[in-house]
Amino acid sequence: MGDSDEEDETQVDPKDKALADLPPVKVRKNDLRDDLFIKLQLICVEALKAHKMQKDVAQQIKQELDKAEEFNELIGKGPWQVIIGRSFASSITHEAMHVSFFDIPKFQETLLVYRSLGVQST
């Protein structure tokens, strides 16, 4: 019985391990809730590890955000947009509280992730 207690202590929650392995980020602007920002970082790091081409990284992040329920709580909002690169300029219009702009120095990439405005019919 003593062995099972030790085994329980050595088991590491995969979420805790992923959070511990997150590389440091330099946040330029973040209007997401803290829990969503952490999940966004996990999604971005996973995509950066899985792909070499920036377009593939952006596509994976966008697909994950579009299908994740916690990122789509408000109905009628526009789709998520992902811009990744080492140097870019942008001028965007986004939903309130749905933008994050940060660098991940470990991967030498900058990410701009935002939710575009929903289509309004007149």
Image (spheres, grey):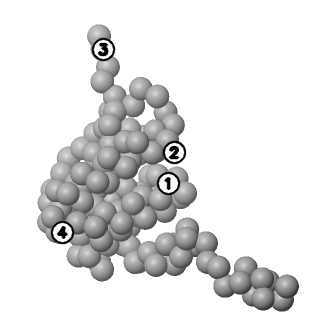
Residue at the spot 49% in from the left edge and 33% down from the top edge: 74
Real-space Cα separation, disc 3 to disc 4, in angstroms: 39 Å
Q: In the image, is residue 118 above or below residue 59?
A: above
Tell me which label, 3 or 4, sits earlier in the chain.
Answer: 4
Q: In the image, is residue 48 above or below residue 39?
A: below
Closer-to-camera residue (99/1) = 1
- Helix, strand or loop at disc 1? helix
* Residue hosting label 4: 52
Residue 68, visible in the rendered structure: yes
In the rendered structure, find residue 70 and report the number of the disc placed on it.
Answer: 2
Q: In the image, is residue 75 above or below residue 57?
A: above
Horizontal relation, residue 79 to residue 84: left or right:
right
- Helix, strand or loop at disc 3? loop
Q: In the image, is residue 15 above or below residue 70?
A: below
Mark 3: amino acid:
Ser
In the rendered structure, find residue 13 and report the number of the disc placed on it.
Answer: none
* Residue hosting label 3: 121
Closer-to-camera residue (5/52) = 5
* Residues under numbered marks 1 and 4 in contact, where contact means CB atoms less than 8 Å apart: no
Mark 4: amino acid:
Lys
Real-space Cα separation, disc 1 to disc 2, in angstroms: 8 Å
